[in-house]
Image (spheres, rainbow, N blue to C red):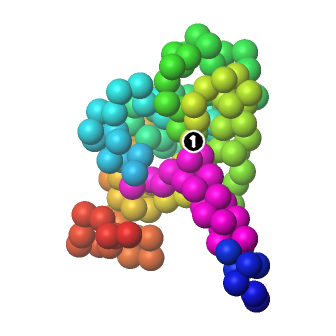
Amino acid sequence: MSAVNLSAANTEAVAHFAARLTFETDVSDVAADLAAGLPGLVVVDSRSRESWDQGHLPGAVHLPTREIATRAAGLVPPDARVVTYCWGPGCNGATRAALEFARLGYQVKEMIGGFEYWAREGFAVETASGVSRRPVDALTAPVEAIACGC
């Protein structure tokens, strides 16, 4: 690859990865933002009622994707920093939910990894029975460290 083509490719790569970081976040960053009390942060669970009842992020708003267009304004302030999540990396529900919020003019990010990685990384999960934590899955996060250091 010539130097000119490499430069163009690097420019495209920078734009690509910068855009991803603008519109995506991960479970560790969401957990840190929630712990810090980031003003205006609203985490939205876009799954079904049955999925929500099975477990969700403490403090999340339950708003299934199909209801966002009609109910978001009554549940989420217009100046909120919205983070959407669904089941996990094998599901694009959070992407569809983020698109709906973007169409409504919200500042929005998708939480990559979804509820699956939230639970697998040992963060608190809420159900009707209360709040609990699962053991950290060593394939997703350091078992004895606070963060992966990336």
- Residue 111 magenta: no
Residue at left offset 34%, top offset 70% = 148
The residue lying furthest to the top in this view is 74
Q: Residue furthest front?
A: 4
- From which residue to which does the magenta span run? 8-28
Q: What residue is disc 1 on?
A: 109
**Which is more toward the observer, 113 or 17?**
17
Depicted 19 relative to depicted 143: above or below? above
Please state the horizontal and vertical placement of residue 138, each as a whole percent of the image: 38, 76
Which residue type carries mark 1? Answer: Lys
Up the image or down, 79 lies above or below 59; here it is above
Residue name at image x 66 percent, y 66 percent: 11
Instruction: Kindly report the secondary structure that dominates the magenta region of the rendered protein.
Output: helix
Residue at 68% x, 31% y: name it. 102
Instruction: Return the x and y of residue 54 as percentages of the image width and height.
Output: 53, 43
Left or right position of 31 against 65:
left
